[in-house]
Every structure is written in structure tokens, then in C-alpha cells.
Amino acid sequence: MKLVANFVEKPWGRHDLPDWAAVPANLKDPIGELWFTPPDGAHLPLLVKYLFTSERLSVQVHPDDVQARARGLAGGKSECWYIIDAQPGATLGIGVRRPLDPQQLRDAALDGSIEREMIWHPVAPGDFFFIPAGTVHAVGAGIMLVEIQQNVDVTYRLYDYGRPRELHLADGTAVSRALPYDMAQAVRASQGGAVERILARCPIFTVLRATDADGLRARLGQQPVWIIPLAGFATADGDSAGVGECLYLDSPASLCLSADAMVLAAVEGAL
């Protein structure tokens, strides 16, 4: 099944999108997000989207499943980011320089020192970061990335650079694990290594980068999979997707990849 592309206007979005981003003519404001949803509106457990940023996004955090359900929510949100493009000097804020307890985190959010406490990681195309629930994080300006996340709309905003938006300090500090980021959860393009590899594996989802459909089928078996082309084309069951598009397949049995294809593949659970 080819998922429907939904462009979302955001004040921090961009007009200079790549050619493959076919923005509807009626949308005039900057585009910040591109979501992929089923044609029938069904709810899938994972959500795939692109982010396009011209400004830093808020410093925020998401609860884990236990914390979210204790607050009456369907679940928490872990996510991951694959960098498609980054302007010179672009950074992601992930983790803090030293452990902070909830009161210290609240104080830093209120006085703005959280900007200095955050670790701002320079990024380049091909970099990948797994962001477990509880991680204090912020997407910087000048970045285009693919985000794969638990499909739950829950975000606690800790700091927003003085912009007049609501903060969620009580819940945000309660669910945060304000610690330095574990770089073992990142894959840097500059490190080289195999193109085909598992990028993230956790109890909630596994994300792989692949160029060969046969190898992908051997890894995945018959389970449902999201396919996000980074180059070339993917086809299955009569549907085709290129860059800026997404397939959701009940199984990868009929998946074919073009000779120049490179895709992200996401499945539920840990492979």
C-alpha cells in the first residue's frame, strides 16, 4: 500500500524544498512536515514523516509507554532521525552535558541555560540518531530528515527560545532522563561501514538501511514493513514509491528495489 503524503505548514518550515516534494499549490506558508498515512485513514503503530527546518525547534521530551499510560495516553513515543540534508553548521540537540535532576532541568528551562546544557551535535547527510523516550532533544535549523516514531501525539515542550508557546514543565521534567546522549545509539556517515545495516533496534521498532530486496526479505520474514526510499524506487503489489514517498506492506514478499535504490525499512519490535 502506498501511503498518502500530507504536507503540514509550520512557521519554522521552509519554502526551498527539493524537487521531489510535490507541495500542493494551495499551500503558501512554509512546509515543516510531510506525514505518510493510509488512504483509508487507518491508524498504524508507527508514523513516518519528513521534517524541514529553517529555525531551531523547541527543546522537548516524550514519555515512555509506562509514563504515558499513567497519564491516560495510548502510549509513549520513541523515535529516530535519518539526516537527508544539512546546511553548514546545522546541529541536533540530543542529551545534556551533565546529569540533571528534575528541579535542575526545570531551572535550566526557565532561565534559558538549557541551551548551554544541551549537547548540539553537528550533522551531515547519512547520519542517524535513535531517540529513546525520555531523551531531551531539539532539531536544529537548516535540516531535512526522515523521522520514524511511535504513532502517538505526545510532546512535552521544555523550552522554546522565548517564543510565546505553552511549556509543559511539570510533565516534561517528570518524564525526562536528562543525561548525556549515548553515541552508541547513533550511526555517523563519516564512520563509513556497510550501507546495508541495522540502524536501530529496540523493543518498539527496528530500522534498517538496505539496497537489496532479497537480503531484506531474509531479515524480515513475513512481517509488516514500512519502506522509505532514499534513492531509486521500491515496488510491491502494484504500487511504486520513490524519494519523498512511503510504502506500507503486510509483508515484503513482493518487494522489488531498483538497481540504484537505497531504502529505510522499519518494522515493529526488535529483530
Image (spheres, rainbow, N blue to C red):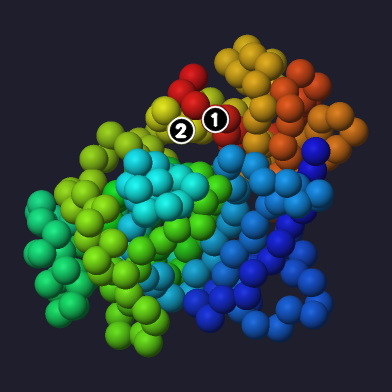
Real-space Cα separation, disc 1 to disc 2, in angstroms:
6 Å
Which of marks 2 and 1 precedes in the sequence?
2
Q: Position of residue 109 (x, y in %)?
A: 20, 72
Q: Are marks 1 and 2 in contact (CB under 8 Å)?
A: yes
Which numbered disc covers residue 268? 1
Q: Which residue is mark 2?
A: 204
Q: Would you say 4 lies left or right of 156 here?
A: right
Q: Is residue 120 above or below residue 243?
A: below
Q: Position of residue 139 (x, y in %)?
A: 40, 63
Q: Is residue 92 above or below residue 106?
A: above
Residue 33 lies in what quarter of the image? bottom right
- Secondary-structure class at tag 2: loop
Q: Is residue 170 above or below residue 30?
A: above
Q: Quick check: can you spot residue 180?
A: yes
| Residue located at (10% from left, 64% from top) | 103
| Residue located at (36% from left, 85% from top) | 163
Q: Nearer the viewer, residue 180 or 39?
A: 39
Q: Quick check: can you spot residue 262?
A: no
